[in-house]
Image: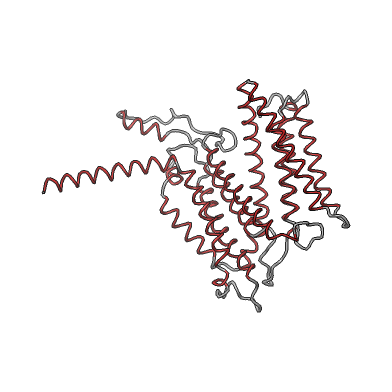
Amino acid sequence: MWAASCLASCCAACACDACRTAVSSISRRSARIAYCGLFALSLIVSWILREVAAPLMEKIPWINHFHQTPNREWFETDAVLRVSLGNFLFFTILSVLMVGVKSQKDPRDGLHHGGWMMKIICWCLLVIFMFFLPNEIISFYETISKFGSGLFLLVQVVLLLDFVHGWNDKWVAYDEQFWYTALFVVSLVCYVLTFSFSGLLFYLFTPSGHDCGLNTFFIVVTLICVFAFAIVALHPAVSGSILPASVISLYCTYLCYSALASEPRDYECNGLHKHSKAVSTGTLTLGLLTTVLSVVYSAVRAGSSTTLLSPPSSPRSGAGKPLLPLDKTEEHEEKEKAKPVSYSYSFFHIIFSLASMYSAMLLTGWSTSVGGSGKLVDVGWPSVWVRVVTGWATAALYIWSMVAPILFPDREF
């Protein structure tokens, strides 16, 4: 009996050591996915509070301090913004802490990959603390979130450009008729969707009998960009491909739609106001799905990128040799720790900070604000211009990626 008890104790100790080792190994390899999971959790919490927190927040005196209680939509917006602010601060603090990490030998490398129980506790405390802040701070955060969301959209553009160029290069590298045909078919489908979508935009946002010159201007400029993409990509001096041009054209058309759909509901040229409820649900779902996929892609991409997310410099693995010789195990561990990091931890967390702002704007419809009077304030036009400018920036970045190697042949792009 005593021997069996000792054997069981030894087995348990060995099992605990094995589990500890396995968890340590998994935490390093899956840290990026774990951060994505935490971000997804924040979206779920925001969505739940958006639906159920309004009656509770009406009873909080420092939130509902108005002479007349605002409507339910005001409290829904306020709850989402407070969770988003907590999420934003959590990832921003991590980003600041990770500035300058270039080697796995840095103690902060362990903070980035481990300590998940403490991180989750800190995240929860931050989110809870946000519900004790005055409305003025939440109003200020709501204002800057629109600009932060625009920056996140620009990050999406850079990742999209990187993705489509990589996609095109991979299929062209096969140098087979099948893949060339696939490139043509995908490009053709993207252009058919682009022009069909543009026709739908004219139908919905330029109704007859109304002066909708601004909407017409937005759509026409988008179409001009679409033709410009194709002309530049097919120019002999550029020797580009039609696939990236078609994908970017479709994305710019989608951004144009998002901008026009963000116009105030009572605007006579917004054709979605008659059935805004059904459209907003689909737009919200698509937007959230795009956000999650963008963040997941950026997190996974961070592990292999050598340009966008890589630190500017990193120490060589041979530097800093010990004075005394080490045995093989210790030497292997020393080499592992001395490896340079494969991506910028600081910029990695900045992506999640900006995504927190963007998801808050999606969940609140881009058209509500916490006003001093406690009423729902329609601020749709700033949201419209953020998306329109993002679309124009997308066009400028894509054209620049095509012509920059020609203008500066001695530089590497």
Name the colour scheme.
secondary structure
* Residue at the image position 32 percent from the left and 29 percent from the top: 324
Residue 293 appears in which quarter of the rendering?
top right
Judge left or right: residue 410 versus residue 124.
right
The C terminus: image quadrant: top right
Residue furthest toward the bottom?
67
* Residue at the image position 61 percent from the left and 68 percent from the top: 75
Residue 113, given in percent of the width and then of the height, sits at 44, 44
Judge left or right: residue 158 versus residue 14.
right
Judge left or right: residue 324 versus residue 150.
left
Of residue 257 and residue 157, the one placed in the foreground of this image is 257
Residue 119, given in percent of the width and then of the height, sits at 45, 53
Of residue 163 and residue 82, the one placed in the foreground of this image is 163
Looking at the rendered structure, the number of numbered marks drawn on it comes to: 0
Residue 8, given in percent of the width and then of the height, sits at 19, 46
Residue 28 appears in which quarter of the rendering?
top left
Does 368 sit above or below residue 188? below
Residue 47, given in percent of the width and then of the height, sits at 56, 59
Of residue 179 and residue 59, the one placed in the foreground of this image is 179
* Residue at the image position 57 percent from the left and 58 percent from the top: 84
